């Protein structure tokens, strides 16, 4: 995947980490382990701004499929 900005790249990483965490939580539940939540930590102000904000800011070529992370 080609990312045109560092914020988009960091957002892509956050989306990937979140999907992996959701998958691992599902597998753990299937094995009978009690899992309440997973925490994905970010230190990127730009990616956090896109996730937490209402718009995409200065990112012009963002794949809108990545914005589902706001709901999670």
Image (tube, rainbow, N blue to C red):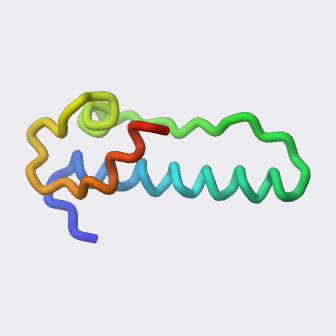
In the rendered view, would you say 19 is above or below 49? below
In the rendered view, would you say 52 is above or below 25? above
Residue at image point 38% right, 34% down: 43
Where residue 14 appears, x then y in whole percent?
Answer: 42, 48
Residue at image point 23% right, 45% down: 7
Where residue 58 appears, x then y in whole percent?
Answer: 9, 40
Where residue 41 appears, x then y in whole percent?
Answer: 49, 36
Q: Quick one: quadrant of the N terminus?
A: bottom left
Residue found farthest to the right: 32
In the rendered view, would you say 45 is above or below 8? above
Q: Which of the two residues, 17 or 67, is positioned nearer the viewer here? A: 67
Q: Which of the two residues, 15 or 55, is positioned nearer the viewer here? A: 55
Instruction: Tell me if 49 is positioned left or right of 41 in this view.
Output: left
Instruction: Tell me if 23 is positioned left or right of 55 in this view.
Output: right
Residue at image point 42% right, 52% down: 15
- Residue 9, by quadrant, is bottom left
- Please give the count of numbered marks on the rendered protein: 0
Residue found farthest to the bottom: 1
- Residue 42, by quadrant, is top left
Where residue 47 appears, x then y in whole percent?
Answer: 29, 39
Instruction: Tell me if 39 is positioned left or right of 64 in this view.
Output: right
Residue at image point 67% right, 36% down: 37
Instruction: Tell me if 68 is positioned left or right of 72 in this view.
Output: left
């Amino acid at each position: 995947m080609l990312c045109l900005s560092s914020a988009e790249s960091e957002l892509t990483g956050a989306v990937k980490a979140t999907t992996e965490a959701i998958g691992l939580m599902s597998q753990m539940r299937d094995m009978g382990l009690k899992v309440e939540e997973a925490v994905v930590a970010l230190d990127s102000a730009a990616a956090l701004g896109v996730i937490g904000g209402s718009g995409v800011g200065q990112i012009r070529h963002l794949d809108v499929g990545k914005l589902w992370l706001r709901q999670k």
